Amino acid sequence: MLEHHPLVKEFPEHAETIHNLKETDNHFHKLFNEYETLDKEIFRIEANQEAVTDHDLTNLKKQRRRVKDMLYNQVLQTKEVV
């Protein structure tokens, strides 16, 4: 089953922190937008709406994971400060 992986669905326990960071932290906001763009592109590819090589799809997924990890780390750092 194909599905999007929105950040708040991936980390529902941090939804409020994610929302606050999107509103107040430009770097987080930029990374969040990059994550959303990658997620949508991967979804389109997996739904056969776009054609790419398996290698390219794998690289996109790795990039999405890297961005998600950076976002998650920033969420955790923010929660430690609060």
Image: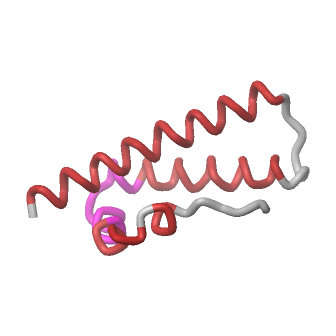
| Residue 54 % position (x, y) | 81, 30
Task: Judge whether 57 appears above or below 82 on screen.
Answer: above
Q: Which residue is found at the position 71% from the left and 63% from the top?
A: 3
Indicate the quadrant where residue 60 lies: top right
Dividing the picture into quarters, in which one does residue 19 lie? Answer: bottom left
Q: Residue 13, how many percent across, how many down?
A: 35, 70
Farthest residue, direction left: 81
Stretch of the chain drawn in magenta: 18-29
> Residue 59: x percent and y percent?
66, 29
Q: What residue is shown at x 35% (from left), y 52% (from top)?
A: 28
Instruction: Pick out the residue farthest to the bottom.
Output: 16
Residue extending farthest front: 1
Residue 37 is situated, as x and y percent measured from the top left of the image, at 61, 52
Q: Is residue 54 left or right of residue 6?
A: right
Using residue 6 as the reference point, say whether residue 11 is left or right of it. left
Q: Name the one closer to the observer, 21 or 1.
A: 1
Residue ID at (75%, 29%): 56
Quarter of the picture containing the C terminus is bottom left
Count of numbered circles in the view? 0
* Figure check: 59 above or below 41: above
Q: Is residue 21 magenta?
A: yes
Q: Residue at x 51, y 68 (%)?
A: 9
Which quadrant does the N terminus fall into? bottom right
The image quarter containing residue 32 is bottom left
Most prominent secondary structure in the magenta stretch? Answer: helix
Colour scheme: secondary structure
